[in-house]
Image: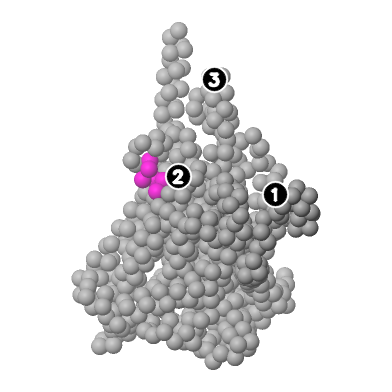
Amino acid sequence: MTGAQIAAAARTRTSVLPRPSTGSRVADFAFRAVMYLSIAVGFIGLGAILYDVASDGLPRLSWEFLTNFPSRIIPERSGIQSALVGTLYLMAICAALVVPLGVATAIYLEEYADRRRWFNRLIEVNIQNLAAVPSVVYGILGLAFIVRGPLSMGRVLLAGGITLSLLVLPVVIIVAREAIRAVPPSIREGSMALGATQWQTIWKQVLPGSIAGIATGVILALSRAIGETAPLLIIGAAVSPRFNPSGLFDSFTALPIQIFSWTTDADREFVSAAAGAILVLMVLLVLMNSIAIFLRNRYEQKW
Amino acid sequence: MTSLAYSRTRRSVGEQAVRYGLFAAAAVSIVTTTLIILSLLRETIAFFGDVPLGDFLFGTKWTPLLGGDQQSFGVIPLLTGTLYLTAIGLVVAIPLGLLAAIYLSEYAPQRVRRVVKPVLELLAGVPTIVFGYFALVFFTPEVLRGVFGLEVNQFNALSAGIILGLLVLPTIASVAEDALSAVPASLREGAFGLGASKLQVSLRVVFPAALSGVVAALILGASRAVGETVIILVAGGQVARLGTDPTVGYQSMAAFIAATSRGDIPTGSIKFETIFVVGMALFVMTLALNAVSIRLVNRYRQVYE
């Protein structure tokens, strides 16, 4: 080919390389098609879930639905007050336990732990493993050690809160570690060079610099905690109680438990109540995630 | 000088205290694991005091809640039920998850990624009870019976398994995408330079290079499916049975635990012990899967970072 021919080829074909064979173009097209299809399945699945829940549940949403207690006798006047209050209490207990424990562990692993020591490596591997232990196993732990056995609290709110806290603790630790790691070493070195101790450096420089990431992790963990059903079933949350928990040592229920018992009720009249409760739970989750996104955008430090 | 020295000691005492305090918090995770193992082990040992190990491992009838002669402790139906449901879920989730991962990592323009990733994260954030509700109230009657005209029971493996796959899909897609994205651009550029097409680069260069991470994603997905409780409890039925008919229900190990333990079983009874034995089996299975998966992830991190 002369230079002019190559230039002409380049103009018409965009590539001077041999044109791909028809077979490979078909393969490329087919591959793109199945990829789009896979993404579409995820979208359609989510869309169908939202549509189904909204169409079953929206008619149920009303102030009475939020403030009534569950009723065995009259399905259409059943409400979720005790479940909603229980879920909010559980969230508060989890936040109170998970924030100090999770952040302290993350600080220890990132700022203090010497990775050459075997027990520090053990802690790390252990947390990775705990993050993937099925939630039923945490339920069993709660049943054996908190509800009965050594702590013997009974089937109370605090037992549920502790069980869920242990379940989501690894999530907080993993996200908080990433946030702390994102603070550049130069910040720490500058602080130490000015005479600050290690803890002063962490408290005054590292934590403020990573607070957005840590808060995001905590919110993610809490939204996982309030969506959990299995551990609370296992430790024995109350079914459709007509009262709110009066304190940490009272029996309780939560939204997922209420949804579960309505979904599986032989009386199909309760299905719309289950859908209504799902909508309330989803609104709660969307609110929490919006706060997380807002915090991340508003306070995230760019170094 | 003395005052300076004094303040130094006081400071270092404080620093030491903080260090120990933080270590104590970190140790909570070790305590948690220890307590999990202890609680499982104690009741498991008690269980095998009453039931021979062979009957449990090889028995084909699981009816621990029945009385007298009807009572039987063969774990095989629960185990096969768990694996069967997991398999259906993975048949759905593996191809879809991997294709989604390849699309996001290799093909998708930035704008599309910014929409698709959050939607998949949203799907991953939906509580499992909602998936269970969807399987029972919508997918079984409207899709399986309605659209496809299948004669399935109200509780059936097909519905529970497919929805289980939908639950696991985002996990597989996200972990596999991380692995694919970690493959250095130079490998792709080299292949393109040799005249490879986009498809060839994606499937024959990037995919094999990320294989350990991709396998880790699949194993993590399997582990999530094995441990998932509520979907199967709600839509998969509560009968432990042997078989491969997808139109009827099966019980899984996790679903058995949640169905049996409602807080009112007397401590020390054989029913109470079965919860822990099955929990132990589940814990060991998922632990093995997770350990392999974590190892593989750490390996590709080492190679490419």
Q: Residue at x 29, y 79 (%)?
A: B74
Q: Amino acid at mark 3?
A: Ala
Q: Which residues are magenta?
A: A120-125
Which disc is residue A88 wearing? none
Crowding near the residue tagged with mark 1, few <14, some 14–19, many ≥20 C-alpha atoms within 10 Å: some
Residue A193, numbered label:
3
| Residue shown at 31% from the left, 77% from the top | B75
The residue sitting at the front extreme is A2
The residue tagged 1 is A294
Q: Earlier in the sequence, mark 1 or mark 3?
A: 3
Q: Few, some or many C-alpha atoms within 10 Å of disc 3 (few <14, some 14-19, many ≥20)?
A: few
Quarter-wise, where is residue B251 in the image?
bottom left
Return the chain for callout 3: A
Of discs 2 and 3, which sits in the foreground? Answer: 2
Q: Is residue A203 magenta?
A: no
Q: CA distance from mark 2 to mark 3?
A: 32 Å
